[in-house]
Amino acid sequence: MANKCIQFLMGAPETDDCVLWPFALSGYRYGQMYFQGKQARAHRVQFYLNNGFYPENVMHQCDNTKCVNPKHLKAGTRAQNACDMAVKGRVHGQKVALTDEQVAEIRASYRYRVVGCRQLGKKYGVSDETIRDIVTGKNRKAKAPDWSEANV
Ligand SMILES: [Zn+2]
């Protein structure tokens, strides 16, 4: 039986623009279709058709969840996806790893309305939000490198 969804994916035009899914959507965000007897997300099926495997997560480089252009899809992990979103929403666009010492320093030096997030962010080269999350304890957990194995 011809599957119009598969046909659409396989016949997606060769373009750098987004190729929008014209059929059903799941939750208004992702293309939805049947594939190998199951409900599947169209962009994941598209990735599978082009690469032969399903990664943990298929990311949209174009941020357009309805897009099924194989050029815009790349494999990633869930963690990467969250990170990707965080980085895109950030002013500096640069990921700076803070050490435990720096995190402790930031917490020690923050004073409400005296030494603010913006000021500390500048000093440590991270965003205001990062500082705010550190100060409020929402983030971090600074992950210091584990050197113990290197010393063995
Ligand atoms: Zn796209």
Image (cartoon, grey):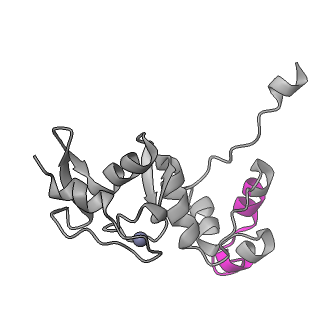
Residue drawn where x is 69% and y is 44% of the image: 143
Q: Residue furthest right?
A: 151
Q: Which residues are magenta?
A: 103-119
85 with respect to 149 (left or right): left
**x and y percent of residue 152 in the render?**
88, 18
Displayed-image quarter of ligand 1: bottom left
Give the farthest residue toward the top.
152
Quarter of image, res 129: bottom right
What residue appears at the point 50 percent right and 65 percent down from the top-left corner? 85
Q: Position of residue 51 (x, y in %)?
A: 46, 46
Q: Quadrant of residue 23?
A: bottom left
Residue 6 place in picture, x, y as percent: 23, 54
Residue 42 vertical placement versus 86 (above, below): above
For residue 102, above or below residue 29:
above
Considering depth in this image, is 117 or 152 the residue closer to the camera? 152
Q: Position of residue 42 (x, y in %)?
A: 28, 56
Instruction: Identify the residue at horizontal 20%, vertical 67% (top origin).
Output: 28
The mark tally for this picture is 0
Q: Nearer the viewer, residue 71 or 150?
A: 71
In the image, 87: left or right of 51? right
Pick the front one: 150 or 106: 150
Is residue 1 depicted above or below 67 in this figure? above
In-image side of 76 versus 13 (left or right)? right
Residue at the outermost left position: 1
